[in-house]
Image (tube, rainbow, N blue to C red):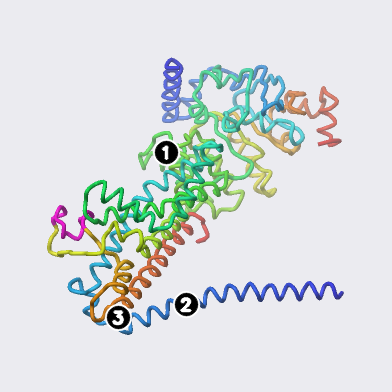
């Protein structure tokens, strides 16, 4: 146990340094191609098996889209990538998920993991704080308290999330007063401010209008230059428009995983074809 | 058609009934406050407000001081207890019993708490009546309220606050301390105001703890001295208790008038405290809720 704790602390410290340095430096540090290697992943809620023997590789600086009908396990799967299912009682995971070569359920501290693997949820999740405080939250919990440094991170993250121009005069207003689309982009900025290398998006546009959706999609395409993005989506068009690879889930299994163009033009599995052509789902 | 008309009629009658009930409560409150205040300030003379002789100043100060101490104690115990119940305790037998214990505590008669306080804080410690013991007794009474308000406030927060924070790698404690507790601050504050109301009005629990006498020397600022105003280990009769003693055993010639004035002051105190606190929590709500655009 002590041994484990030491490794975790070591990793946390390393993450912490990364968080302070520039993105480029952090990116150069990582030599691996694959952000995630998922091997034989099973997930159970009590006795129900929600994910069955998932094997997949998520590549760096790509957008990987997860599609499939409701209840197919795509949201459950994305939550395992930063261990957001840790709080679900009776949830059990077997198999391996390697993040940059380390097993996230064994070798990596869950908090340190979430510094590196950020998440944007289906409903925007702003805190009842000012816009500034919302975005500064991630750096603050990582121990950054220097006002100037925080202001820099906030501005940079807002530029990256394309909300700076819109919200620069409203930094000290409550984030709950923003529109849904603004809130979602604020949440993306908040995630970026924590200096992750991966952004998980769980149906980030399903609660938004078409214009806001468009903005988020454009943003995702820009962000993949620096980040690895995994996105769960209900919309086949969205997967097609923005993703490099698409994974099709059905009843807890990964039925097909291929690059997006091939997947949508010549799907290998007849069920994939039926789903993407809208015959069920 | 007639069915629809019937439905509409019933609807109207019920609306009138509910309106009547509400109006009755409001009228009762306004009339009651009005009566006490008019009655009290009508017979008031300036020397009644003094801090010497039969003046009420000292009791007023004791009341405020005691409520302040009691709120401090019930906040220091009740808020953590509420956080524990809402965030850490597993739902099971133990929490069930804890919750039942808290509910029972809430329905204890205050005279029983007073006698317990007398036994535990006065007899067992071998001290004289004191404000500190009184405030502990009052905080026993207000503890359940503060605990359950805190617990409910935390439970009623949208799960997105928790999700968003944990998703950024915050620990459970960071999430509670930096997001959840600030978010339910206005509601916890409302709970504390209600607790304060209880403290202002409490008499039975204080009779054998805070004592029925007060002797303050306003020039004495040596906190260890028994007549220093800020020494919590001195006897300190509060306004509510003073009303009771004036109406039962006082030999003062204008005891009845003094009691009326005390009641009026207490009423003003309670109302203004609750208005002020509501204003503050409204301001906080507005600041966090973004309705000020």
Separation (CA) of disc 2 from disc 1: 49 Å
Decide: few, some or many residues near mark 2? Use Cα within 10 Å; few <14, some 14-19, many ≥20: few
> Looking at the image, which is closer to me, B96 or B183?
B96
Chain ID of residue with mark 1: A
Which residue was labeled with disc 1? A140
Local crowd size for mark 3, using a 10 Å CA cut-off: few (<14), some (14–19), many (≥20):
many
* Residues at marks 3 and 2, CA–CA distance in whole angstroms: 22 Å
Secondary element at tag 1: helix
Q: Main secondary structure of the magenta part?
A: loop
Disc 1 vs disc 3: which is toward the camera?
Answer: 3
Front position in the image: A217 or B247: B247
Tell which residue pokes out farthest to the top in this image.
A3
Picture layout, residue A170 above or below residue A76: below
| Residue occupying the point 44% across, 20% down | A5
Q: At 48% from the left edge and 36% from the top edge, which residue is drawn? A: B172
Residues packed near mark 1 inside 10 Å, few (<14), some (14 to 19) or many (20 plus):
some
Percent position (x, y) of residue B212?
26, 64
């Amino acid at each position: 146990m002590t041994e484990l704790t030491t490794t975790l602390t070591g990793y946390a410290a390393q993450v912490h340094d990364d968080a302070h340095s520039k993105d480029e430096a952090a990116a150069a540090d990582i030599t691996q191609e694959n952000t995630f290697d998922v091997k034989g992943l099973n997930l159970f809620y009590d006795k129900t098996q929600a994910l069955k023997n998932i094997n997949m590789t998520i590549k760096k600086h790509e957008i990987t889209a997860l599609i499939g009908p409701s209840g197919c396990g795509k949201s459950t799967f994305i939550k395992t990538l930063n261990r957001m299912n840790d709080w679900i009682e009776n949830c059990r995971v077997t198999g391996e998920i390697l993040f940059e070569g380390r097993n996230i359920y064994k070798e990596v501290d869950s908090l340190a993991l979430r510094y590196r693997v950020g998440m944007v949820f289906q409903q925007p999740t702003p805190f009842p704080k000012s816009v500034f405080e919302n975005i500064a939250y991630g750096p603050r919990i990582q121990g950054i308290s220097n006002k100037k440094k925080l202001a820099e991170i906030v501005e940079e993250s807002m530029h990256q999330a394309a909300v700076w121009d819109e919200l620069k005069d409203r930094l000290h207003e409550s984030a709950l007063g923003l529109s849904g689309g603004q809130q979602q982009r604020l949440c993306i900025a908040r995630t970026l401010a924590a200096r992750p290398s991966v952004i998980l998006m769980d149906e980030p546009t399903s609660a938004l209008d078409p214009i806001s959706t468009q903005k988020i999609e454009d943003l995702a395409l820009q962000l993949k230059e620096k980040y690895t993005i995994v996105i769960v989506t209900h919309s086949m068009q969205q997967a097609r428009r923005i993703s490099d690879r698409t994974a099709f889930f059905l009843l807890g299994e990964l039925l097909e995983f291929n690059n997006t163009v091939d997947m949508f033009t010549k799907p290998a599995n007849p069920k994939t074809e039926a789903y993407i052509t809208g015959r069920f789902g | 058609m007639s069915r629809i008309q019937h439905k509409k009629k019933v609807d109207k009658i019920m609306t009138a009934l509910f309106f009547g009930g509400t109006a009755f409560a409001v009228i009762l409150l306004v009339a009651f406050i009005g009566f006490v205040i008019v009655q009290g300030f009508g017979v008031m003379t300036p020397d009644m407000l003094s801090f010497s002789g039969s003046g009420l100043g000292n009791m007023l100060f004791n009341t405020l001081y005691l409520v302040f101490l009691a709120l401090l104690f019930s906040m220091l115990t009740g808020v953590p207890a509420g956080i524990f119940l809402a965030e850490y305790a597993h739902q099971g037998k133990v929490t069930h019993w804890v919750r039942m214990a808290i509910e029972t505590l809430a329905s204890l008669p205050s005279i029983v708490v007073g006698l317990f306080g007398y036994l535990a804080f006065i007899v067992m410690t071998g001290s004289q009546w004191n404000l500190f013991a009184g405030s502990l007794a009052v905080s026993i009474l207000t503890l359940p309220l503060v605990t359950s308000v805190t617990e409910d406030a935390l439970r009623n927060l949208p799960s997105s606050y928790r999700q968003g924070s944990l998703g950024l790698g915050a620990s459970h404690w960071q999430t509670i301390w930096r997001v959840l507790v600030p978010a339910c601050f206005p509601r916890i504050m409302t709970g504390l105001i209600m607790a304060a109301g209880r403290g202002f009005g409490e008499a039975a629990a204080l009779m054998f703890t805070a004592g029925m006498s007060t002797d303050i020397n306003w020039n004495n600022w040596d906190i260890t001295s028994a007549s220093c105003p800020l020494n919590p280990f001195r006897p300190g009769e509060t306004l509510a208790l003073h009303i009771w003693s004036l109406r039962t055993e006082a030999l003062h010639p204008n005891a009845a008038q003094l009691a009326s004035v005390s009641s009026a002051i207490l009423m003003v105190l309670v109302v203004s405290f609750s208005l002020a606190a509501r204003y503050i929590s409204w301001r906080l709500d507005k600041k966090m809720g973004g309705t000020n655009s």
